[in-house]
Image (cartoon, rainbow, N blue to C red):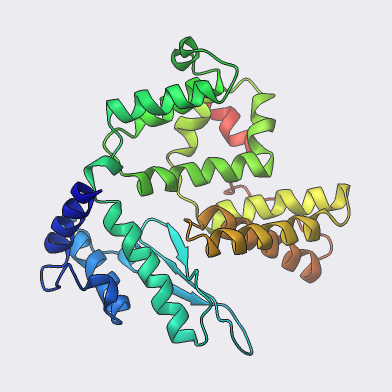
Amino acid sequence: MDRTLESLSHIVAQALPHRDPALVFKDLNVVSMLQEFWENKQQQRATFSSEGLVVYESMPSSGPPFVSYVTLPGGSCFGNFQCCLSRAEARRDAAKVALINSLFNELPSRRITKEFIMESVQEAVASTSGTLDDADDPSTSVGAYHYMLESNMGKTMLEFQELMTVFQLLHWNGSLKALRETKCSRQEVISYYSQYSLDEKMRSHMALDWIMKERESPGILSQELRAALGQLEEARKAGQELRFYKEKKEILSLALTQIYSDPDPSSPSDDQLSLTALCGYH
């Protein structure tokens, strides 16, 4: 633990050279520190784009407790886990959670290495009925996980989680199950979707899928949205990374909005992601 704190202090000194490492998490100006941290990272990478912005979102509320979310460059999302009596306090609390995770993400132990992959695969095997031999077979779930880890060697945990969120949503949405019924291999699915970021086009496509589910099973959208809101609330209060739960909420809300604004939505446009496109890739 002492070594971890020493490493973390070293990272703070590098990432925030004008700040006292001992006072970083006590400083009320944590919002500006989070912004400074990511601006410094962008300068080190010599990249300047909208992806480098730290974005805050306050949930509408007529009174306390207030809820605030912060989305980091790349898409990782965090929220305030304390009961906050003002929007400013909620924003600071969310920024503090995000800053702690951003700094810990810089630790060497938070990068995907061969040792980490070996340990992760062994844990995956232990939690399933598979064997270590499955790790070399991309057609198995353990093998697909192994392939994803190998493909992201050297990346940080937050960077890997950003990719995993896409596949979590595809699994939740039912798209992965549908793809298993085609001739596309797990390896091809991973390679295909690894090229895409989670953007408005993908959200719209998933929302359309849920509109189709609502037609088949009326009420399922509201049921899923209630569950997603509960999961988001629970994860936020636990200080966890929130993007998966928040994206579920956004996708389901978009589907409901489209249903009420257009009872008979048109079929997806040609430029939307689809199973047909992926099978064509195959």
Quick check: can you spot residue 267?
no
Above or below, 73 relative to 147: below
Quarter of the figure with the C terminus: top right
In terms of image quadrants, where is residue 247?
Answer: bottom right
Q: Position of residue 137 (x, y in %)?
A: 49, 14
Side of 132 relative to 13 (left or right): right
- In front: 22, or 148? 22
Residue shown at 64% from the left, 57% from the top: 231
Above or below, 67 relative to 279: below
In terms of image quadrants, where is residue 184?
Answer: top right
Residue shown at 31% from the left, 35% from the top: 112
Quick check: can you spot residue 41?
yes
- In front: 81, or 186? 81
Above or below, 222 relative to 29: above
What is the number of callouts on the image?
0
Residue shown at 65% from the left, 25% from the top: 180
- In front: 75, or 10? 10
Residue shown at 29% from the left, 64% from the top: 49
Q: Position of residue 129 (x, y in %)?
A: 60, 17
In terms of image quadrants, where is residue 273?
Answer: top right
Q: Position of residue 19 (x, y in %)?
A: 15, 73
Side of 28 relative to 41 (left or right): right
Above or below, 237 relative to 248: below
Q: Position of residue 41 (x, y in %)?
A: 21, 60
Residue occupying the far front of the picture: 2
